[in-house]
Image (cartoon, rainbow, N blue to C red):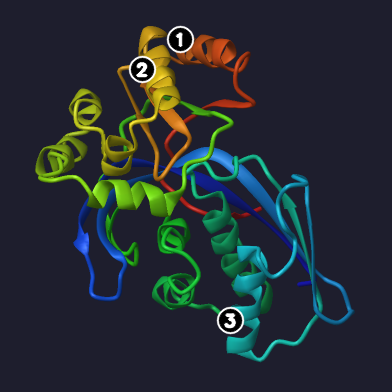
Amino acid sequence: MDRISVSAPAKINITLDILGRRSDGYHELRSIMQSVSVYDRLTITKTGRDGFEMTCSEPSVPCDERNLVIKAAKAFCEKHGITDGLLFELEKKIPSMAGMAGGSSDCAATLIGLDKMYGTEMTLSELIEIGQMLGADVPFCLAGGTQICEGIGEKLTKLGGMPHCYIVAVKPDLSISTPKAFAAYDSIENPKMSDFRGITEAFEKSDLDGICHRLFNALEYASSCEEIESIKERLISFGASASIMTGSGSAVYGIFKDKAVAEKCCGELSKDYSFAAVCEPTDFGCVIL
C-alpha cells in the first residue's frame, strides 16, 4: 500500500474537571469527551525520497517537526524501523487553537494511517502508548466516540453514546493561553466541580436534557472571557438547550434538538466569526477512507 487517506474528527468536552496538581507538575483531569462530525483529512503517500514532507491547506499551520503529524510519524517509524520517505497532505477543517483537538486528531490519524499502511496491526493500547507521549488529547482521538478521560488524558473509559442532537461550534478570533487558564483555575479557592455522577447517569439513560443541564468546563469557569460569554448567550438566544466553551478554548458550542434551528443559528453566527459549523456527535474516531 503506497497511499492512504484518513479522516480526523474534532472533539468537544462535555465536562472538564481539574482534580488537582500532580507531583510532575501536570494537572489531574477528568473529562467526558465527544467526537463530532467536523473532520480534517490526512493523506499519506510513500515518496521514494528521503525523510518526511508535509503540506497543509491552512497556511498558518507549521509543516515541520513542530507539527504533531511529523512527530507521530517519527515516533511510529522509529518504533518499527521504517525508513521510507513519506508525504503528508493535510486538509484542515478543524480550527486551530480552538480546544477541538485538531492537532491531536491529526496526530491520531497519522498513527492509524501508518499502522494500516504498514500492516503493523497495533492494538489501541499500543497506539495510545505512543500517542500519550505526543499530546494529552491524542489517546481520546485514537479511541473516539464518547469517553471518560482521566489522568492527563491517557485513561479512557467508554461511555454510552451521546443522544442524537445537533451541535453548533463557533471559534472567535481570540486565543486563550492554556497555561494561563490553568493558572487562573489554580488561584481559585474552593473551585466548582461538575455533577459528574449526574451526567454519567444521564448518558446511561440517553437523557439529552440531563446532559445539557450538567455541561461544565473548569477552564471556562476560571477564564471569565467576555467574548466567550457573548457567544454562549447568542447560542442560547438562537435556541440552544445549553452552551459552553470546549477544552481550553476558544471555541464554544451549543446543543440543539432541531436541525433547522441549528442551521439558522450557524448562518447568523458565521456572519461574525470565521468558523461556525453545524455538526453531530459520532461514535467513532479516525477512519480509513
Going by the numbered disc 2, the residue's amino acid type is: Lys
Residue 270, relative to residue 26: is it above or below? above
* Residue shown at 54% from the left, 28% from the top: 172
Going by the numbered disc 3, the residue's amino acid type is: Thr
Q: What residue would you read off at disc 1?
A: 261
Q: Nearer the viewer, residue 281 or 189?
A: 189
The quarter of the picture where residue 230 lies is top left
* 10 Å crowding of disc 3: few (<14), some (14-19), many (20+): few
3D distance between C-alphas at marks 1 and 3: 45 Å
Q: Nearer the viewer, mark 3 or mark 2?
A: 2
- The residue furthest front is 187
Residue 239, relative to residue 115: is it above or below? above
Q: Indicate which disc residue 77 carries.
A: none
* Residue shown at 20% from the left, 25% from the top: 213
Question: Is there any visible trace of residue 210 in the rendered image?
Answer: yes
Contact check, label 1 and label 2, Cβ < 8 Å: yes
